[in-house]
Structure formats: structure tokens, C-alpha cells
Amino acid sequence: MGKLHENAKTARQIRMEKQRLYCKRLEIRLRKEREAYLKNLSEDFPGTWKSVAETVERGSGSAYDEACHILIDICEAYELFANKQQFQRELKKFVTNNHIKYNFYLI
């Protein structure tokens, strides 16, 4: 019975280690994909801002949610491939140009 318990414990440790390695590889792959996506955004910031403006113009709740997600991506792209101050300037311009009537704190 002791050997059976030991084998089960070893098998569980092997499965856990394989799962840990799988998760680590997945995390690395997803991070690389995210960085490639953000790099692509950074290569056409004006076009991306235009896309957000068009999304906001739809005026629906889902459009605003979509715009928020895109803005988060743009912010991250600026942080990685430009700078945060530039993002803040562009965001202020975006809010002014699109007559967004709510206040928020710039990150």
C-alpha cells in the first residue's frame, strides 16, 4: 500500500509540474501576442484614435464599453512604445474633440 501511495504522490507531482510549465508557456505566448497587438496599435496611433471616436459616435452602451477597452489598449501601447504623457495629451484632445461631458482622472 505504501508503494501505491508513493507512486500516486509522484504522479500528482509530475502532473502539477507539467501544468505549471504549460501555464508558464501559455503566459509567455499570450504576453508576446499582446505586445505584438500593442505594437501594431502604436504604428498607427492616429488611426486608432479615429477608430475610438467612430465607436463612441455609435452612442450605445456597448459602444462605450468597446471604446473603453480600446482606450486601455492605447494607453498600454503608449506606455510600451511611446510615453504616458503623450497619451494623456491625446486623451485630453480626444475628450475635447468628442464633447465627452464627464470628468475622470488621467492615469
Image (cartoon, rainbow, N blue to C red):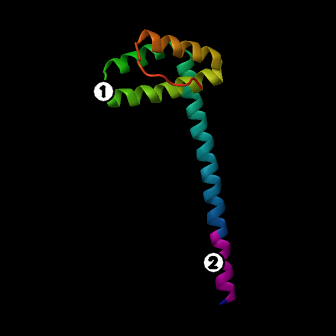
User: With respect to residue 9, does 52 lie above or below?
Assistant: above
Residue located at (58% from left, 17% from top): 88
Would you say 66 lies left or right of 36 here? left
Of the pair 96 and 40, the residue shown nearer to us: 96
Between circles 2 and 1, the one closer to the viewer is 1
Residue 47, position as x, y percentages in the image: 46, 13
For label 1, the residue is 60
* Magenta extent: 2-12
SS class, disc 2: helix
Q: CA distance from mark 2 to mark 1?
A: 55 Å
Position in image of residue 16 (x %, y %): 63, 63
- The main secondary structure of the magenta stretch is helix
Q: Residue drawn at (56%, 33%), measured in percent from left and top? A: 34
Q: Residue at x 57, y 23 (%)?
A: 106
Looking at the image, residue 1 lies above or below residue 54: below
Where in the figure is residue 78, as x and y percent of width and height? Answer: 60, 20
The residue beneath circle 2 is 8
Q: Residue at x 45, y 28 (%)?
A: 68
Q: State the image quarter where residue 27 is shown.
A: top right
Q: Secondary structure at mark 1?
A: loop
* Residue situated furthest bottom in the rendering: 1
Q: Are marks 2 and 1 in contact (CB under 8 Å)?
A: no
